[in-house]
Amino acid sequence: MSELTEIRRVFEGLHTLYEIHLPKVHPKLIHDLMMRRRNEPDKDPFYLIEIFTKPEINSEEMRTYIISKTGMNPTIHDNGTHYAFNNKLTLEFLKELSDLKDVIAIYGDYMGAVTGVGASHDHREHEHGWVK
């Protein structure tokens, strides 16, 4: 039983690190990225990345920022507060996005390639316990 207790303890510690260092990123996205990088350390996987921002942000500035960082033109939803784009993903890029002051939540789904299906998350998901 002590092995299971240790797994639970380490898992809770990892989740705490996620909250401290990447507070705006959904833990499922971090975990998925880390598992894919563990299996293929030399490959940056493609994700559909969704960023939710505060309503008062200048959506054209955010769009320009995303294009400058990724070369991808995001789709913009929800009156300029929800941006979706496909891109290779790294932990460093997630940290950069999480550190942006006007970002409130970041989600992502593994796509495997440049093509994608479009935005699929609702920003209210972050109100259910993973971002405080």
Image (spheres, grey):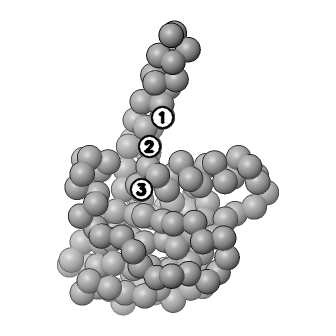
User: Does the image show residue 13?
Assistant: no
Residue 18: assigned label: 2
Residue type (three-letter) at the residue carrying disc 2: Tyr
Mark closer to the chain start, 2 or 3: 2
Percent x, y for residue 1?
50, 10
**Looking at the picture, does residue 12 appear above or below residue 85?**
above
Q: Secondary structure at mark 3?
A: loop
Residues under labels 3 and 1: Cα distance?
Answer: 14 Å
Circles 3 and 1: CB atoms closer than 8 Å: no
Mark closer to the chain start, 3 or 1: 1
Please tell me how crowded label 1 is: few (under 14), some (14-19), or many (20+) other residues with Cα within 10 Å: some
Percent x, y for residue 114?
64, 81
Which image quadrant for residue 45? bottom right
Which image quadrant for residue 61? bottom left
Percent x, y for residue 68?
55, 82
Q: Which residue is mark 1?
A: 14
Q: Residue at x 51, y 66 (%)?
A: 109
**Looking at the picture, does residue 12 appear above or below residue 71?**
above
Residue 63: assigned label: none
Q: Secondary structure at mark 1?
A: helix
Q: Which residue is mark 3?
A: 25
Q: Residue at x 24, y 51 (%)?
A: 128
Circles 1 and 2: CB atoms closer than 8 Å: yes
**Looking at the picture, does residue 108 appear above or below residue 41?**
below
Q: Residue at x 28, y 67 (%)?
A: 123
Percent x, y for residue 49?
49, 71
Please tell me how crowded label 2 is: few (under 14), some (14-19), or many (20+) other residues with Cα within 10 Å: some
Which image quadrant for residue 100? bottom left
Residues under labels 1 and 2: Cα distance?
Answer: 6 Å
